[in-house]
Amino acid sequence: MAKILITGAKGQVGHCLTQQLTGKADILAVDRDELDITDREAVFKAVKAFQPDVIINAAAHTAVDRAETEIELSEAINVKGPQYLAEASNEIGAAILHISTDYVFEGTGTSEYKEENKTNPQGVYGRTKLEGEITVQQANPRSIILRTAWVFGEHGNNFVKTMIRLGKEREVLGVVGDQFGGPTYAGDIATALIKIANLIIEGKTDAFGIYHFTGKPYVSWHSFAQAIFEQAELQKIIENRPVVNSITTNDYPTPAKRPANSRLDLTKIKQIFDIEPSDWRKALENIKAYA
Ligand SMILES: NC(=O)c1ccc[n+]([C@@H]2O[C@H](COP(=O)([O-])OP(=O)(O)OC[C@H]3O[C@@H](n4cnc5c(N)ncnc54)[C@H](OP(=O)(O)O)[C@@H]3O)[C@@H](O)[C@H]2O)c1
């Protein structure tokens, strides 16, 4: 049985990874309380003791606005932690799968970003995630970086849950209509990572490197909110859907600048691993699980 170490196991993606791998692989699924990835000694000890074939790192400092002031913490979790995991996996000959983000790009224009396009993060979260990508690749050549965006799932906080809550409280709300991206179901990210992990473990691929994986079709947050309310009303989670006004990024100032264009080109992951984009509309059909 394949041995897989999952870090950040209680997060949105980590939870789905653990769920999907239980009974299918020999897993060690740990979160901060069991393995703090910023503790170098603890990381090496855990990796050497468990001897995984693959590490999947789903741990991160994902609070984008807080990161602007929690700079050292962001660097520790998004750069140092991944570095220790990559070094430790490299030392025992294991591969590492690491998750990154659309925030590594500036997010201008309307075209889809390819893996090799120029990065230019606009905030601390994006910068530290980019440094994490680089350090992982340097420390372990047998690494996969999966960049994703707009993640939502049954576990943890996300936009879908926030909208359902607001939909119960308000009759009118404003949602940003000038940022575009692909909402991505955490369960689909887990499925994609597990597929790649299995191919690596079975020796069927050595196509290490950076990959983009998000949901399709691309939408604005405003359109995504409307799709959420449609499902929520249909499935009687809310009585009446609220009026959703489209507002601009300038109308809703936040400490961290967000990319206006989070569209990622998904050709490479399809070509190399035959992985289709996440079908976020299908994932929303299970909206009761998010309420
Ligand atoms: N969420 C998004 O929209 C989004 C978009 C693009 C990319 N991503 C990337 O996708 C990946 C997964 O995101 P997610 O949404 O599943 O994140 P999440 O729900 O915030 O989960 C991250 C997990 O990592 C844990 N963690 C934090 N610091 C740790 C440490 N020092 N040691 C061990 N565990 C630690 C967190 O624990 P605590 O709860 O205790 O902090 C949490 O359980 C991340 O790499 C993220 O950057 C996310």
Image (tube, grey):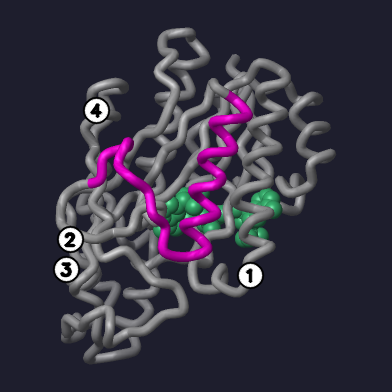
What residue would you read off at disc 1?
70
In the picture as drawn, the residue positioned furthest to the top comes out as 203
Of discs 3 and 1, which sits in the foreground? Answer: 1
Locate the N terminus and report the quarter of the image it occupies.
top right
229 relative position to 165: left or right: left
What residue would you read off at disc 4?
270
Q: Quadrant of ligand 1?
A: bottom right
Task: Pick whichever of labels 4 and 3 is earlier in the sequence.
Answer: 3
Cβ of mark 3 under 8 Å from ligand 1: the answer is: no
Locate the C terminus and report the quarter of the image it occupies.
bottom left
The range drawn in magenta is: 113-140
User: What is the crowding at mark 2: few (fewer than 14 residues within 10 Å), some, or many (at least 20)?
Assistant: many
Q: Residue at x 35, y 41 (%)?
A: 188
Give the spatial CA distance, label 3 vs label 1: 31 Å
CB within 8 Å, label 4 to label 1: no
Query: Judging from the image, what secondary structure is the residue with disc 3 in?
Result: helix
Give the spatial CA distance, label 2 vs label 1: 30 Å
CB within 8 Å, label 3 to label 1: no
- Mark carried by residue 219: 2
What residue would you read off at disc 3?
223
